[in-house]
Image (cartoon, coloured by chain):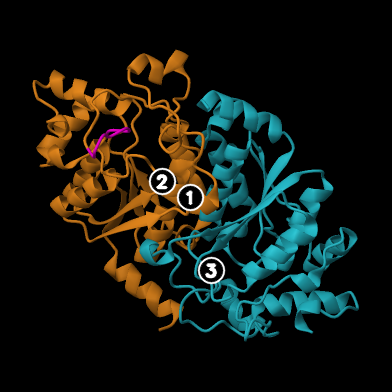
Chain colours: A cyan, B orange
């Protein structure tokens, strides 16, 4: 098979395919459901990067199956050899804060920030998108219940998309890439409502940063955000049962 | 150790450190020498991504040792699980072209293009830079003897830098990242001359895309470019001995 044959094949097969970053958490489950509801055949991609809440990858598998992905790739980031992804409470021996004030002192970037994480994840998604012939990447960043992470801001996503369109053969050849952020303007309550409309089974998801024996702690930033939002809707967070 | 302690430590230790993308080829050896000559303590990073010329990683190790890096990280990209990096003659069962006309038909992107490769490599470099407290990344892209790869163009590098400064805690906190491209305006002859001035031992480098028993083939695009440049300088390419 020549390179030209492969490209033609990818183009025809992937005209409505998308790459979806799937963490196993609440937000990315809704993102995947949104992409599916728009008719995309979804290639899900998740990352094993040494996160202490690696149990989220099992959740990602369950969510991908429930929502019917074409394929689900779980990529291991060579964290030890890499040496990046350090200095964060998500991967190092640093305590995960257990209330919202400590998690966001004076509007600072939280200790759960992982250096360049979304940049690396999106770059893998970009490479996969080009290979499967997709011009669409979905990611669950959000500007309302803002996490405080620099790489979740709209300005970052816009800059990433601009860069991506200069980086790839597809971009050069006039097949631009779009980064979809269907949660960008939604509150956590709005995200949960959208997910319920789209048939997401939230009991399959895992958001906790600091699970105990695979179960959500109920007190970290990630747990509190979703717990409060479910309560506002008069519901119990099924991940805390 | 708290996250804050780690950050302070990195800042003081890394005030003049740089992250250098080191492939083992001629260009990145000169880039590393240029970074060293500017007084940077260099953290070299290389990638094992399933390239058929993986022997370049041995060259990268030798070059890093010769030029005195602080550390050298070789990161394995989980290529099989990832599924990206496909459709390229560098990783797939596609023939590597053996003369310059075929390698660049009608100015098209060559079949040796690897989707999103530099984007992924730079993203790892970005993560490592933030962890070691560096605001400087060096990469050997070149706009003169232009490879035809979209992710080697100056516009791509500028867009990457803009994105990177929105992506990271360092960028948000006013410690901007600079991507250094010391080879950008140099011809291959100019690159070799600079390397000779800076003491690069080119016999340690490996550029060939299609090595036979670990030796340069002498006929692929990468071999021809450097062979011709050495000849213009009245020299023999030491990698072809």
Q: Which residue is mark 1?
A: B79
Eye-nearest disc, 3 or 1: 1
Name the foreground residue: A174 vs A49. Answer: A49
The residue lying at 39 percent from left, 65 percent from top is B131
Name the foreground residue: A44 vs B174. Answer: A44
Rendered location of residue A103, percent (x, y): 60, 79
Same-chain status of marks 3 and 1: no
Name the foreground residue: A191 vs A5. Answer: A5
Decide which of tag 2 and tag 1 comes sooner along the chain: 2
Q: Secondary structure at mark 1?
A: helix
The residue lying at 58 percent from left, 38 percent from top is A130
Q: CA distance from mark 2 to mark 1?
A: 7 Å
Q: Magenta-highlighted stretch: main secondary structure?
A: loop
Same-chain status of marks 2 and 3: no
Image quarter (top left, top right, bottom left or bottom right) of the C terminus of chain A: bottom right
The residue lying at 76 percent from left, 74 percent from top is A226
Above or below, B100 against A227 in this view is: above
Rendered location of residue B69, percent (x, y): 21, 57
Q: CA distance from mark 2 to mark 3?
A: 30 Å
- The residue carrying pointer 1 sits among few (fewer than 14), some (14 to 19) or many (20 or more) residues within 10 Å by Cα, namely some
Q: Secondary structure at mark 2?
A: loop
Q: Chain of mark 1?
A: B
Name the foreground residue: B233 vs A203. Answer: A203
B189 relative to A12 in the view: left or right = left
Q: Which residue is mark 2?
A: B50
What range of the chain is rendered magenta? B208-214
Q: Which residue is mark 3?
A: A113
Above or below, A84 against B231 in this view is: below
- The residue carrying pointer 3 sits among few (fewer than 14), some (14 to 19) or many (20 or more) residues within 10 Å by Cα, namely many
Instruction: Please tell me in which quadrant of the rendered image residue B128 appears.
Output: bottom left
Eye-nearest disc, 2 or 3: 2
Marks 2/1 in contact by CB < 8 Å: the verdict is: yes
């Amino acid at each position: 098979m020549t390179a030209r044959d492969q490209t033609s094949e990818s183009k025809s097969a992937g005209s409505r395919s998308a790459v979806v970053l799937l963490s196993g958490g609440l937000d990315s489950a809704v993102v995947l459901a949104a992409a599916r509801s728009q008719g995309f055949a979804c290639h899900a991609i998740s990352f094993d990067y040494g996160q202490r809440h690696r149990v989220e990858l099992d959740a990602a598998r369950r969510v991908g199956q429930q929502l019917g992905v074409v394929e689900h790739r779980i990529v291991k980031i060579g964290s030890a050899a890499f040496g990046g992804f350090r200095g964060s409470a998500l991967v190092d021996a640093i305590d995960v804060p257990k209330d919202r004030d400590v998690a966001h002192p004076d509007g600072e970037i939280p200790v759960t920030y992982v250096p360049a994480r979304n940049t690396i994840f999106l770059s893998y998604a970009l490479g996969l998108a080009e290979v499967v012939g997709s011009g669409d990447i979905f990611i669950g960043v959000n500007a309302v219940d803002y996490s405080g992470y620099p790489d979740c801001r709209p300005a970052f996503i816009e800059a990433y998309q601009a860069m991506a369109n200069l980086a790839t053969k597809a971009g050069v050849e006039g097949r631009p890439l779009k980064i979809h952020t269907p949660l960008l303007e939604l509150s956590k309550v709005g995200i949960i409502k959208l997910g319920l409309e789209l048939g997401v089974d939230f009991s399959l998801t895992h958001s906790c940063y600091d699970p105990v024996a695979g179960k959500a702690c109920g007190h970290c930033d990630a747990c509190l955000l979703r717990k409060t939002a479910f309560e506002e809707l008069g519901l119990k967070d099924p991940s805390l049962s």
